[in-house]
Image: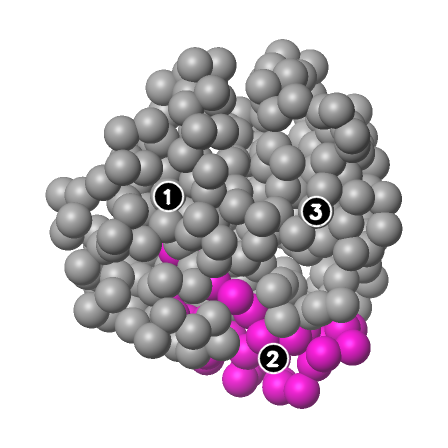
Amino acid sequence: MKIFGVIHLKGLPGSTSNSLSLDEIIKLAQNDIDVLTEGGVHGVIIENFGDAPFVKDNLSKRSLVSFTNVVSNLNIDSHLSTGINVLRNDGISALAIAEACDADFVRINVLNNIMYTDQGIIEGKAYDIAQFRSTLSKDIQVYADVFVKHATPPYGAKIENHTKELLERAGADVIIVSGDGTGEETDIEDLKKIREIVPEGKLAIGSGLNINNIDEYAKVSDIGIVGTDLKTDGVLDNPVDLKRVTDLVNKIS
């Protein structure tokens, strides 16, 4: 299993939650990246987590420029896979940032179908993503959530069917399975069902991974996306803790 650490950016200029300068935001993010790199992670995902409350799928121009500015000024080791996630669900902006900053992939929370979220009903835009992706100067992979956290699927929807559609009809390269919320454990039974559908190397856990459950999850998934558990005392708003990173990475080495 590969471990991808999450960089939770503080509120960016353009969001209602902004209280820091770009230089301050960059410094905090760089500190977390440096610790994750020293701890041996295989990749990082940078997201505008501090921008809550989020817009659905159309990041403001000011926020887009701020996000791009931050990422372009981060020093990220070339051996790390780098991803961009624009919350709540702006895949076009994520791809644009990824191209401009030479990132490898984007995470898109709702690529197809619909989900009921705290931002209202979010509709996937797989066609728009595919069309925009075809114009890019480099191949940027799409990591797509199935039944994304902090959201509810339509009544009667089956996670296996949504997974097949993401792979076969929506252009997803990697499938992400999460718990109900940030830091909450992923249902191992859902993972086992999806493992039978998703090719090797293409299944990621999106929440709840920690040193106590990683052995079990590593048997059925390929990538662990970890944010909360790598922070000091396991508190989301704290900086990344080196010992927690090395302990987790060494557990699967």
Residue position marked by numbered label 2 in the rendering? 22
x and y percent of residue 241 in the render? 29, 72
Mark found first going from the N terminus, 3 or 1: 3
Mark found first going from the N terminus, 1 or 2: 2
Mark found first going from the N terminus, 3 or 2: 2
Answer with left or right where residue 248 lies relative to residue 144.
Answer: left
**Vertical relation: 222 (above or below) 245:** above
Residue at the image point whose x is 27% and y is 37% from the top: 216
x and y percent of residue 148 in the render? 63, 42
Q: Label 3, label 2: how many angstroms apart (C-alpha)?
A: 30 Å
**Vertical relation: 63 (above or below) 59:** below
Residue span colored magenta: 4-33
Residue position marked by numbered label 3 in the rendering? 151
Kindly identify the amino acid type of the residue bearing the numbered disc 2: Leu
**Vertical relation: 38 (above or below) 226:** below
Task: Name the secondary structure under disc 1.
Answer: strand
Dot 2: few (<14), some (14–19), or many (≥20) neighbours within 10 Å?
some
Q: Front-most of 217 and 77?
A: 217
Q: Label 1, label 2: how many angstroms apart (C-alpha)?
A: 29 Å
Residue at the image point whose x is 48% and y is 22% from the top: 194
Kindly identify the amino acid type of the residue bearing the numbered disc 1: Gly
Dot in front, 3 or 1:
3
Residue at the image point whose x is 61% and y is 64% from the top: 49
The question of residue 179 being in magenta is answered with no
Q: Front-most of 167 and 77?
A: 167
